[in-house]
Image: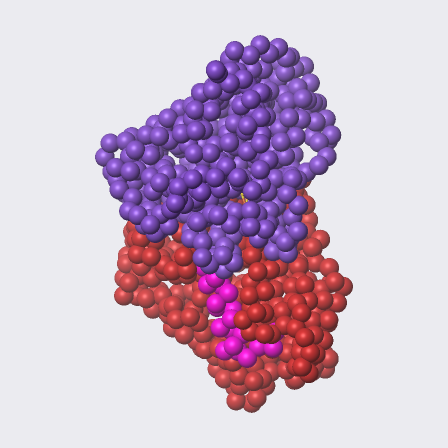
Chain colours: A red, B purple
Amino acid sequence: MNAQAASQDVIKEPSMLKQKAMIAANFDKLTSANETGQKIAATYVPGNLNELIMCFDMGNNLPEINAINNGMRKKSGAMITEAEKQGHSEDVCTYVKADIGNMSRGAIAPNGKPMPVPDLLLLSYTGCFTFMKWFELLRDQYGCETTMLHVPYEGDGKITQNMRDYVVKQLKEDVIPALEKVSGVKFDIDRLREYLRKSAAAEDNLVWVLESAKNKPSPIDAYFGGVYYIGPIFTAFRGTDDAVEYYKLLRTEIEARLAAGKGPITPEGELTEEKYRLVVEGPPNWTSFRDFWKMFYDEGAVVVASTYTKVGGVYDQGFRHDPDHPLESLADYCLGCYTNRNLPGRVDLIEKYMKEYQADGFLVNSIKSCNSFSAGQLLIMREIETRTGKPAAFIETDLVDPRYFSAANVKNRLESYFQMIDQKRKGGGSAAAA
Amino acid sequence: MSKTVTEIVDRCQALFEDLNFTSAREWKAAEPGRKVVGYMPVYVPREIIHAGGMLPLGILGGGEALEVIHGDAYYQSYICRIPRSTIELAITKRIDFVDGMLFPSICDVIRNLSGMWKLMFPKVYARYFDVPQNYRDDIGGNYYVEELRELKEGLEEVAGRTITDEDIRRSIAVYNENRRLVQEVYDFRTKQPWKAPSWEVYLLMRAGMVLPVEEHTQLMQDYLAAAEAEDRPMKDNCRIILQGSFCEQPPLNLVKSIELAGCYIVDDDYMLVTRWLLGDCPVDGDPLRNLASKFLHESMETAAKYEPDGTRKGQYLVDAVRDRAAEGVIFAAPSFCDPALLDRPMLANALSRADIPHISFKYAENSGQMQPIREQAGTFADTIKLWS
Ligand code: SF4
Ligand code: SF4
């Protein structure tokens, strides 16, 4: 293996400890809402309006994150079965079923305490049709107050003024009044500006970290490591001092790794030899996340850029939250999230990554649950192969449904893919390993 | 001489089976400069296409007869069948005469197909047609009017001419007439389902996907007259509503099987585009504003639309059961269909609260085995009859 000799107690970097403490504190805050009286909004990662929610002193509970947590703790399988027993189809997104199953089992957070039923479902309908049905389902079951923010899709690959106006108007006339009503707090736009300023500062450092992968060797893994790096900015921390602090720490650490010519940290230590540089499209599998990652670092494969780390905002292409145009910039943020971009736009972005990050290959992890990502990925793969001449491969897993992660199949597929990259380097052909 | 039911239905069946869309090709070839604009389920304002002198052509996948060879290379096994058979139609040049394609906002599969079309067929005008999920005139309405304007401009480029407000008003009137007839056919079937078997009504509405609207209106008039005149025996069937088939279409045999199993289908959600707008759209005033306001305030409920009032979720289905004097609901959704399958538990809850029996199954456009469905529908019919 390429990672340093496995060590059970790999030293945690300060940024990791910081993030862990932030998450724990947030769970404590959420699970004590019934005692503290704090109101809780539930919302999704893409189109997440955390700064706005904070303006009303409300907590932010993200059901996708709960599903991921339960997936990583290997609890999601039973929750999905529970939801299917209640009549939810085996064909639909497993985040939804993990969430519904979780709620009917008491919604126990990682701290062992139950999550409160949200006071408001903030249905930010960005980049995924399922989001709309998901909160309709929760509303049906729990009778929660719901407010909808419809974010139009970038069908022609651009944000038009009409789309922006539509989103801003909904924010002003629907979403903000709903938040005011539930929280009893009056909206203060200057407070929002202040949070957005902090968001932008954190975003600058996040982008620096993601782009550090352009170096050879890359000091980070932009997929398996990347999902930790995006944690705070995609969730309940964007706009907070904690997030600013976290990204400063992270950047300092990565700067040091870069200066020392070090590779990424893996669960088994540092990766010492970078053999393959990959761009990955699609979310990871969470139920076997560690095993999945190991299949890469054991072979010396480093993901240098990924699209999944853009679902909650495509910051590396220049977007920043803008305190001078607060509502407009929230609108542009929602409109620009990765899965809200059209297919040609996604192909262009991936092609850019392949070139700018000097990738050896392109890998699609196609997720059974997610039509938003998955429908069209085979064409994306072909386009990227044609445009870059680099070999591409396709694997199929699921997010939080353990029934759809076949470790042996994935491993075989990856091994033959890495061989293919080797052959290609030696001047061989480039057929897709689909 | 007036036409018989058999003649009308035979014609519709021939149109349905023709995967080369010969009638639309002939329409296009009849005059130089004619253009055809395809659209997928669930709703597009066909009035604007028509106003540009073009033929709106409903593309509902390849059905059971189309062998999908290329399409499977574009889709994973866990994605429904309609996008792959639609790609197949395009790759095999069966729709190579289509000058534009509209992809309505119904789900992420059709949404992404719009981008695939842009990549694969760059010469064809391809547009994702978004509609508001906010139903206030000054919010969703303003947004939608502007979307309609953009659509109109895009269609003007395809047509090679401007589309005036007057053109659109005239087309709205033509489609109002068509909607009235569609409603009459549905009402006729509700009253005398033995005289208008569902597979016939289905084929009649499918004909509306490919024929010029004026011809389709006439065809429905002819059908109503012929079906009324026909002497058909009334059977001891129960009356059900079919739900969830608004996009990928079931094989015709499935529609027939349900009736053979003892269920009259007295309402359905096939081809919602034909009756999306409820009742006439006003022809005076700003036509785009009229289309928008109709969409916001008087249009069909379906899974692709957000229901802002949680207490009303599924109420439209409960109301339909009452209005159509139905005794139960059969949920028949395509496998892997997010909108239909995610909506189903909520609709089922609403039905259960109203004590309306329901069953559900899934299909694909090329499902072969009808026996299990027939048995399930037969048992359902027996149960309903037993308890009614
Ligand atoms: S379908 Fe995809 S984007 Fe939508 S909720 Fe599921 S995983 Fe998320
Ligand atoms: S059948 Fe359902 S999932 Fe498939 S394209 Fe149609 S609406 Fe979308």
Q: Is residue B21 above or below residue A296?
A: above
| Residue A353 highlighted magenta (yes or no) | yes
**Which quarter of the rendering shows the N terminus of chain A?**
bottom right
Q: Look at 56% across and 85% down and name the residue there.
A: A216
Residue B158 % position (x, y) = 37, 50
Q: Is residue B126 above or below residue A140?
A: below
Residues B349 and A211: in front is A211
Is residue A119 something one can see in this rendering?
A: no
Residue A363 % position (x, y) = 62, 68
Residues B365 and A254: in front is B365
Q: Look at 32% across and 66% down and name the residue there.
A: A322
| Quarter of the view holding residue A385 | bottom right
Residues A22 and A146: in front is A146
| Residue A307 highlighted magenta (yes or no) | no
Predominant SS of the magenta segment? helix
Residue B227 % position (x, y) = 53, 16
User: Which span of residues is magenta-colored?
Assistant: A338-361
Is residue B106 something one can see in this rendering?
A: yes
**Left or right of residue B231: residue B158:** left
Name of the residue lying farthest toward the left:
B285
Q: Look at 43% across and 34% down and name the residue there.
A: B212
The total number of labels drawn is 0
Residues A242 and B70: in front is B70
Q: Look at 54% across and 71% down and name the residue there.
A: A387
Q: Is residue A232 above or below residue B175?
A: below
Residue A284 % position (x, y) = 61, 63
**Which quarter of the rendering shows the C terminus of chain A?**
bottom right
